[in-house]
Image: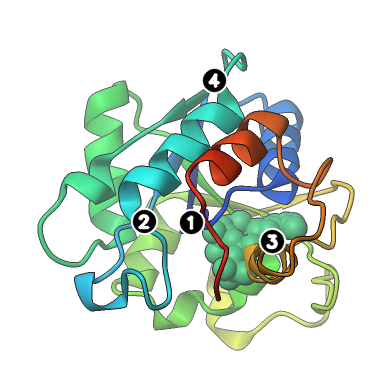
């Protein structure tokens, strides 16, 4: 089984990397494919950093980890990207039918708003880790009703809770504060040499 971690990665941070690494270890994933999302052109600059920068930061962040790979499948596609299409395409590329989407619990709670979320839940496992500030999904309570029928598809990951988000990091960077140990050093160097996140 291989894992897929999608996100905007604006910028990628240690919360993402710990999530991916702990998922790989806990569920013996063959690989974790990190998939930066395409952002509608009208949002670039306003709410999101250009894809080329987000992609480069992911490449730098995962450098040296033989289990991690980046995929540009969503960046290369015309029009909006839907996870179900990404899952099918990555299965073809990596020649494996078993996949697990890795996501924070905040994303899992929003899954019902994704296109074809029922097919996603039927087709693929979900590895989810808890994020500070979100409820914890225990065995018998707190299950959102849309997930009821798919409990067996959801694998709960025990991983350290890192209270880091890209939104918070963008503010810290804009204020000129240190993000060392929250973001890999190579990514920090890239942010500085390209003047990213200087304004909100
Ligand atoms: P933003 O603050 O811009 O919304 P983010 O930090 O949540 O960004 P995304 O790129 O949207 O990052 O996240 C990709 C995936 O990683 C999502 O499934 C999200 O739940 C998960 N994730 C992000 N940060 C953490 C964290 N600190 N711990 C666990 N999961 C996380």
Q: Nearer the viewer, mark 2 or mark 4?
A: 2
Percent from the top left, x then y, of residue 50? 34, 56
Q: Are marks 2 and 4 in contact (CB under 8 Å)?
A: no
Q: Which residue is mark 1?
A: 7
Please report the residue visible at 68 percent of the width from the left and 39 percent of the height from the top.
Answer: 17
Using the image, determine if residue 132 lies above or below residue 103: below
In the image, farthest residue toward the left: 78
Of mark 2 and mark 1, the one earlier in the sequence is: 1
Percent from the top left, x then y, of residue 74? 26, 50
Q: Nearer the viewer, mark 2 or mark 3?
A: 3
**On residue 173, which mark appears?**
3
Within 10 Å of disc 4 (Cα), the crowding (few <14, some 14-19, many 20+) is: some
Q: Is residue 192 left or right of residue 195?
A: right
Cα separation, mark 2 vs mark 1, equals 6 Å
Q: Which residue is mark 4?
A: 30
Q: Are marks 2 and 1 in contact (CB under 8 Å)?
A: yes
- Whether disc 1's CB lies below 8 Å from ligand 1 is answered yes
Please report the residue visible at 65 percent of the width from the left and 84 percent of the height from the top.
Answer: 144
Q: Is residue 3 visible?
A: no
């Amino acid at each position: 089984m291989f894992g897929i971690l999608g996100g905007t990665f604006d910028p990628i941070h240690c919360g993402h990397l710990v999530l991916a690494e702990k998922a790989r270890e806990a569920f013996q994933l063959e690989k974790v494919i990190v998939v930066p999302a395409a952002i509608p052109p009208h949002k670039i600059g306003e709410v999101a950093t250009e894809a080329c920068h987000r992609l480069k930061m992911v490449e730098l962040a995962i450098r040296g980890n033989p289990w991690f790979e980046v995929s540009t499948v969503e960046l290369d596609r015309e029009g909006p990207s839907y996870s179900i299409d990404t899952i099918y395409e990555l299965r073809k590329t990596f020649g494996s039918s078993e996949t697990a989407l890795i996501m924070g619990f905040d994303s899992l709670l929003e899954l019902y708003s994704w296109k074809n979320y029922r097919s996603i839940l039927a087709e693929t496992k979900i590895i989810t880790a808890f994020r500070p500030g979100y409820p914890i999904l225990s065995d018998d309570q707190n299950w959102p009703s849309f997930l009821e029928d798919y409990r067996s598809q959801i694998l709960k990951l025990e991983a350290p809770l890192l209270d880091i988000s890209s939104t918070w990091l963008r503010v810290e960077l804009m204020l000129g504060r240190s993000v060392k140990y929250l973001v890999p050093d190579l990514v920090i160097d890239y942010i500085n040499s390209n003047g990213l996140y200087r304004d909100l």
